[in-house]
Image (tube, helix red, strand yellow):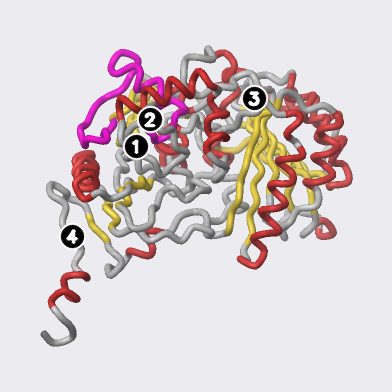
């Protein structure tokens, strides 16, 4: 035939999936390249097929198709994981971004959220009623992926992790069936979903408990020159160890942007930034912050009453999609002065102006949840670190990756040996297992054997089924 053989023509036709009502994309289709891009610019994978789902039935149909065709599976929620787990080479990418339903019950203080929502979208819907739940610190982060990996955010000390506020979930299993999980329905699965990631099925909808927050909170940024780093980190550590639960915060080693609020001599140089999110009565926030600002007066103070949704977008500009990223993370037993000295020495000499080394405080509401209540553990660690390497040029890969690995390794003597899984890159199976501890990891492997014995859902921070 003109222009090629019949086999050539057929190879360009996107295959059908029985019972699927969404959009299917293969490499020859318009929109395929946009659909396969993820947050981390280092990831360039090419799925054989992208199934852009509209409904839970579409997800079931896609799973059944993958099983029958013997295709590896990935699940695209927000695409924000540094590993690029949302896309899989030569497999089926089940794209959840079309599941955008959101329904807030302001009386019951709950929300039902489709798995394709981002935190910016969910926050906006909940704040119409002055309600919120702990959510991602970058508004483009997917709701489902963050929640299943535990869910760290500015409100965690007052409200607990996202997973601590999970009421129920709708799940498509490795057989393509649809089940519910809650404290009373499939409770073992519900336990595993709260911190075990996407290992046990594809969550299509979550019900979350909401809390009165905002619409105004006391929030913003405190900025310090790098020369004050030791003083600032020690003052922040001491302040957060005794701070009220309503004071959410994060301390970041970063490079000052060329912004109007930054004094011109500081622009482009290493600085210390402290993000503040006080979720209690706004007029009480300054008193709660005083132990830090009195001990370490900031060079720039941008903390003020602002909408909670604005706080949730404060670091968006510093985390643009498409940059090359390498991450790691750790929980700390403590942050003694010698640990801070070493951290300051290394973190104030970033490999890239986009690099961010972030400390966040723990305890509060996180520690009031029993250790065995959810798959997530390490609830009593006072601090955690997110080592976030970010850069633009592939020629700089080795230098930036080496810098993050060197810093993380140097800080190991003070860590718990566990980590928040959403902060981890591809660091090996032992690192994943250590994140749960031996007893929980064994329980999770048994749960995996029950719900996904063939390990269909393995393109993630994987928990293999027990043998």
Q: Mark 2 points at which residue?
A: 465
Contact, mark 1 vs mark 2 (Cβ under 8 Å):
yes
Distance from disc 3 to disc 2, alpha carbons, whole Å, reads 31 Å
Q: Mark 4 points at which residue?
A: 15
Q: Nearer the viewer, mark 3 or mark 1?
A: 1
Contact, mark 1 vs mark 4 (Cβ under 8 Å):
no
Image coords of residue 394 (percent x, y): 61, 66
Q: What stretch is highlighted in magenta?
A: 171-199
412 or 257, which lies in front?
412
Point 20% across, 43% down: residue:
64
Q: Name the residue under label 1.
A: 455
Which numbered disc, 4 or 2, marks the residue that appears first in the sequence? 4
Distance from disc 1 to disc 4, alpha carbons, whole Å, reads 24 Å
Question: Which quadrant is the C terminus positioned in?
Answer: top left
Distance from disc 3 to disc 4, alpha carbons, whole Å, reads 48 Å
Distance from disc 1 to disc 2, alpha carbons, whole Å, reads 7 Å
Image coords of residue 189 (percent x, y): 34, 22
Which numbered disc, 3 or 1, marks the residue that appears first in the sequence? 3
Look at the picture and state if 401 lies above or below 288: below
Disc 3 residue crowd, few under 14, some 14–19, many 20+, Cα 10 Å: many
Image coords of residue 260 (percent x, y): 72, 57
Contact, mark 3 vs mark 4 (Cβ under 8 Å):
no
Look at the picture and state if 173 lies above or below 110: below
Q: Name the residue under label 3.
A: 362
Contact, mark 3 vs mark 2 (Cβ under 8 Å):
no
Under circle 3, the secondary element is loop
> In the drawing, does residue 202 fall left or right of residue 43?
left
Point 72% across, 60% down: residue:
258
Which numbered disc, 1 or 2, marks the residue that appears first in the sequence? 1
Look at the picture and state if 279 lies above or below 140: above
Look at the picture and state if 4 lies above or below 378: below
């Amino acid at each position: 035939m003109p222009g090629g053989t019949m086999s050539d023509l057929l190879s360009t036709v996107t295959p059908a999936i029985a019972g699927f009502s969404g959009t299917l994309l293969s490499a020859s289709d318009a929109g395929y390249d946009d659909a396969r891009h993820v947050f981390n610019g280092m990831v360039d994978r090419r799925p054989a097929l992208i199934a852009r789902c509209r409904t839970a039935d579409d997800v079931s149909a896609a799973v059944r198709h993958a099983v029958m065709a013997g295709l590896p599976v990935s699940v695209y929620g927000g695409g924000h994981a540094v590993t690029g787990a949302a896309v899989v080479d030569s497999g089926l990418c089940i794209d959840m971004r079309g599941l955008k339903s959101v329904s807030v019950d302001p009386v019951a203080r709950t929300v039902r959220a489709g798995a394709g929502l981002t935190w910016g979208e969910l926050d906006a819907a909940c704040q119409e009623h002055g309600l919120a739940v702990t959510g991602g610190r970058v508004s483009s982060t997917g709701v489902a992926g963050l929640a299943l990996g535990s869910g760290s955010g500015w409100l965690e000390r007052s409200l607990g992790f996202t997973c601590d506020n999970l009421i129920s979930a709708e799940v498509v299993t490795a057989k393509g069936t649809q089940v519910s999980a809650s404290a009373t329905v499939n409770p073992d699965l519900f336990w595993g979903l709260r911190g075990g990631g996407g290992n046990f099925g594809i969550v299509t909808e979550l019900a979350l408990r909401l809390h009165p927050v905002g619409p105004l909170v006391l929030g913003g940024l405190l900025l310090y020159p790098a020369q004050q780093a030791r003083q600032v980190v020690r003052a922040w550590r001491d302040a957060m160890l005794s701070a009220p639960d309503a004071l959410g915060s994060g301390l970041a080693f970063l490079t000052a942007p060329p912004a109007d609020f930054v004094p011109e001599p500081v622009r482009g140089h290493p600085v210390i930034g402290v993000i503040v999110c006080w979720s209690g009565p706004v007029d009480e926030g300054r008193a709660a912050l005083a132990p830090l600002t009195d001990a370490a007066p900031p060079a720039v103070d941008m903390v003020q009453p602002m909408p909670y949704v604005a706080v949730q977008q404060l670091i968006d500009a510093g985390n643009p999609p498409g940059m090359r990223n390498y991450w790691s993370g750790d929980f700390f037993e403590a942050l003694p002065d010698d640990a801070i000295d070493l951290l300051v020495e290394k973190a104030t000499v970033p490999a890239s102006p986009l690099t961010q080394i972030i400390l966040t405080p723990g305890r509060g509401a996180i520690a009031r949840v029993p250790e065995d209540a959810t798959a997530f553990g390490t609830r009593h660690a006072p601090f955690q670190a997110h080592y976030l390497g970010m850069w633009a040029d592939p020629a700089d890969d080795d230098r930036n990756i080496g810098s993050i690995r060197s810093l993380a390794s140097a800080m190991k003597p003070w860590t718990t040996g566990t980590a928040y899984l959403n902060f981890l890159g591809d660091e090996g199976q032992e690192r994943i297992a250590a994140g749960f501890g031996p007893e929980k990891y064994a329980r999770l492997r048994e749960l995996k054997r029950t719900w996904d014995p063939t390990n269909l859902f393995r393109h993630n921070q994987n928990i293999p089924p027990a043998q």
